[in-house]
Amino acid sequence: MIRKTVLGAALALFAASAAFVVTEAQAATTSAAVLKHYAELAHAKYEDSLTTAQALDKAVNALIAKPSDETLKAAKDAWIAARAPYQQTEVYRFGNPIVDDWEGKVNAWPLDEGLIDYVDASYGTESDENALYTANVIANPKIKVNGKTLNLSKFDAKTLRSLNEAGEIEANVATGYHVIEFLLWGQDLNGTGPGAGKRPYTDYDKANCTNGHCDRRAEYLKAASALLVSDLKDMVTAWGPKGKATKNVEANSKKGLTAILTGMGSLSYGELAGERMKLGLLLHDPEEEHDCFSDNTYNSHLNDAVGIKSAYTGEYTRVDGTKMTGPSLSELVAVTDKSLDTEMLGKLDATLTAMNAMADRAKKVEAYDQMIGEGNKEGNAVVQKAIDGLIDQSKSVERVIASLKLGKVELEGSDSLDNPDAVFK
């Protein structure tokens, strides 16, 4: 479970030791420029997420129109490409309520995939926590939710929205990247052995249908893909020059800077180091990997780390290769404490080095779910080093918060890091 941790006034004492202090007028001007560029980067990242999601949608259409090994692989490749820019936006979570209120539509995880489609017998048939654990809406056009019949004769945006968190159960995820991932790959039944999901293209071939209901499966996949595009358009608008998210961060320098650092610290510590990485390592459970159907987890974690650094440096390389730079939080911190800026940059780079080592191992040696397997000392150590880097950089984030005199700032915590014994209860 995630908990909150508060940075109190005591940390602000660190600011008193800064080499020198920028004047209020200078700080306001510099902060405004930093926040303007922070919003510009968000807009660019969500635009790239939209562009790649549109390419994914086109590939999904091609798969549905002419199912084959080739069109299924093309759709999978498009999904993996779409994940990279989106993961780099996750640093805008936690500090920006507009993003947090929206995020569950596109990246909710983990999910009980039995809600959506057929599953292997090893999945089980029921759950004490979820009455819809194996509802299989693709096979069943009518299901009961809290005693009421839900008509699913047609899959469209409205239907998928009604299914999301059905019965007030968070694991009933019906929309977003991970639903599309499951519909393209199917379950990964390899445990901590090699291999990802192996859904056959014939699951979409109406003339030679495998596993039944190929028409409805295609309709669901198409609806989920189109809805992802629509949802990303909303976030592109929100971060446009006149968008609500942009206005929110630019309206107040202190709140805007707090938003940047809350995103950096919370994603580094509670979310990525804790819930997404340490929890799986403690349990040695492949079900705890983020992109669990595709074995793309290493790539998603790496791009989260890239996004965290980008929020600090103001640098971003777009999917077309264009490099964006501008006024950054790094420059603002360097004005008051050059050594702290050097420390923060060093910690971010150390984490990326560890993440890249993990990614390199995933490409050459074994997938992420194998790395966290029980008894795999070398693989475990590679993942732990990345976790250590994230934890270490979050401590420097706290020092930056104190240096900029932002007062109390709440960062996400995690039982996996703060109370690991609770994980096994």
Image (cartoon, rainbow, N blue to C red):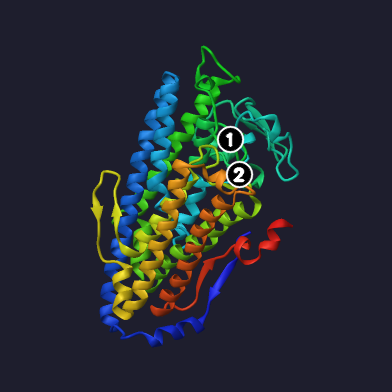
Nearest the viewer among 92 and 202 is: 202
- Residue at point 38% right, 62% down? 349
**The quarter of the displayed image where residue 29 is located:** bottom left
- Please name the residue shown 62% across and 60% down the image: 416
Give the side of residue 419 with respect to residue 38, left or right.
right
Residue 321 point in image, percent of width and height: 25, 46
- Which of the two discs, 2 and 1, labels the residue nearer the N terminus? 1
Q: Position of residue 409 (x, y in %)?
A: 49, 73
Give the residue at x 28% y 71%: 331
Q: Quadrant of the C terminus?
A: bottom right
Check disc 1 and report the residue beneath it. Answer: 188
Residues at marks 2 and 1 touching, judged by CB atoms closer than 8 Å = yes
- Density class for disc 1 (Cα within 10 Å; few <14, some 14-19, many ≥20) is many
Q: Is residue 132 above or below residue 25?
A: above
Residue 58 image-quadrant placement: top left
Label ID, residue 286:
2
Answer few, some or many: residues within 10 Å of disc 2's Cα (few below 14, many 20 plus, some between 14 and 19): many
- One can see residue 92 in this view: no
Residue 211 x %, y %: 60, 21
Tell me if 112 is positioned left or right of 242 in this view. right
Which residue is more in the foreground, 155 or 406?
Answer: 406
Q: Dot 2 lies on which element?
A: helix
